[in-house]
Amino acid sequence: MTNYIYATSGKAVGFIRGRFVHSLNGKAIGQLNGTNVHRLSGQYVGELHNDQVVDKHLGSFGNIGNPGNPGNPGNPGNPGNRGNQGCPYRDVFDKLL
């Protein structure tokens, strides 16, 4: 089963495979360290909250380093729009791109 990541508007914008975040076309763009989301280069971006990458104003969790590129697993398909979930936090998925 694919775990999709959504914008706060409800649009699918990416997916998680293992500990890596991918854009919908399969390109690796980030990595997970628990709920902390980092760029592939290691720089902290935000938190994974309700299948969204958001800024919870928790400060910076630093740089966890570059783990290398996990490759492109391909396009998993688009699940469509799930609708706005009413998230109180600012969407920061675009910082991964």
Image: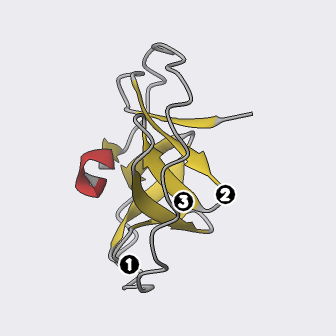
Residue at screen point 51% across, 15% down: 82
State the residue position of label 3.
20
Amino acid bearing label 1: Gly
Q: Nearer the viewer, residue 96 or 25?
A: 25
Q: Is residue 54 above or below residue 10?
A: below
Contact between labelled residues 1 and 3, with CB atoms less than 8 Å apart: no
Residue at screen point 38% across, 78% down: 42
Q: CA distance from mark 3 to mark 1?
A: 12 Å
Estimate the x, y position of residue 67 in percent, counting from the top left. Answer: 49, 80
Residue at screen point 45% across, 42% down: 26
Q: Which mark is residue 18?
A: 2
Badge 3 marks a residue whose secondary structure is: strand
Label 2 Cα neighbours within 10 Å, binned few <14 / some 14-19 / many ≥20: few
Estimate the x, y position of residue 30 in percent, counting from the top left. Answer: 42, 61
Contact between labelled residues 3 and 2, with CB atoms less than 8 Å apart: yes
Amino acid bearing label 3: Phe
**Of callouts 2 and 1, the N-terminal one:** 2
Q: Nearer the viewer, residue 47 or 20?
A: 20
Badge 1 marks a residue whose secondary structure is: loop
State the residue position of label 1.
42
Estimate the x, y position of residue 56 in percent, counting from the top left. Answer: 40, 58
Is residue 69 rendered to the left or right of residue 62? right
Amino acid bearing label 2: Gly
Q: CA distance from mark 2 to mark 1?
A: 16 Å
Contact between labelled residues 1 and 2, with CB atoms less than 8 Å apart: no
Q: CA distance from mark 2 to mark 3?
A: 6 Å
Is residue 90 rendered to the left or right of residue 17? left
Label 3 Cα neighbours within 10 Å, binned few <14 / some 14-19 / many ≥20: many
